Amino acid sequence: MTLLASWVAVDSRKPSAIYIVSDSKITWGNKGEYKYGRKVFASLTSPNIFGYCGDVLFPTIFLSQLVSLIDAGLIIKTEWTYRKKTAAIIKYLKETLSTYPYRKGDNIMRDELEIIYGTRDKDSTFHCVDIKWSKHNKWTFQSLPMERQSYQLRITGSGKFEFKKKYEEYIQNKGMRTSRAMFQTFCDTLKNIKDKHCGGAPQLVGIYSKPNSPARNYGIIYKNHRYALGLLVDACKNMNADTIEWRNELFEICNPKSMNRREGAQAQPYP
């Protein structure tokens, strides 16, 4: 299954960013597992991010194609409202899934699929939409409410109960609802998770409130290794800190070469 979370970051009582984070493990029952599966997607030209849980193969195919088409200027336009963008995405999602052979057998597709969609309107207002499908061809769509403080928008997947328990412990200990609380809890949960269907490294995408800025993929320094979109990239020779933004388990901005907190970056204490 998956551990998938989304949250909004609030700075001075105003939303400043929206994030989606996931684990990287894919399992086939007890037959095998793969710890480097991609589960989050970010447009490189527009403020649109996605994450999924439930079925693996279909959303991996669909979202990779969708984001590439968005980057090419197709499917949606940046100046559209989130409602119009969401409607266009759901239209293509429904049409594409209708041709997928999920009715052919129990091993083709899982019984459920969930996609989290995050975006930013032209006025820098953030939105997050939860899209669900079941094998009975039942669709549900929910626009998730934004809060006036950093707050979890959606926690889902088979690992959600372990995450929620740790997050409440964090809040009781620290008393703060922040982005670092969400990400630190996510990493801590993933390191010690009992659900055998969750694992691998965290993978993170996000959108900032800066006008005209596209979404971002993040590199993650996890257990003293470098990961990008769930894939181990220690062997990559190009570790330019300007290529993508890197975060460690404390949610600190880091230099990927040294794997230390970047000079001048804000320290993020752990309770």
Image: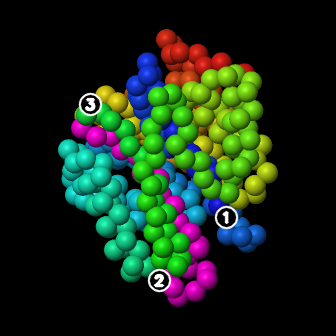
Which circle marks residue 67 in the picture? none
Q: Are the two marked residues, 1 and 3, in contact with CB atoms closer than 8 angstroms?
A: no
Does any portion of residue 259 appear in the rendered image? Answer: no
- Answer whether residue 117 is magenta in the image: yes
Which circle marks residue 101 in the picture? 2
Front position in the image: 219 or 83: 83
Which residues make up the magenta segment? 102-122
Q: Position of residue 50 (x, y in %)?
A: 44, 51
Q: Residue at x 55, y 39 (%)?
A: 152
Q: Secondary structure at mark 3?
A: loop
Locate the C terminus and report the quarter of the image it occupies. top right
Q: Is residue 221 left or right of residue 245?
A: right
| Amino acid type of the residue tagged 3 in the rendering | Pro
Q: Which residue is mark 3?
A: 211
Q: Position of residue 105 (x, y in %)?
A: 58, 86
Q: Secondary structure at mark 2?
A: loop
Q: Residue at x 51, y 57 (%)?
A: 52
Which circle marks residue 27 in the picture? 1
Q: Residues within 10 Å of mark 1 (few under 14, many from 20)?
A: some
Q: Nearer the viewer, mark 1 or mark 3?
A: 3
Is residue 236 shown above or below 247?
below
CA distance separating discs 2 and 1 = 20 Å
Front position in the image: 21 or 253: 21
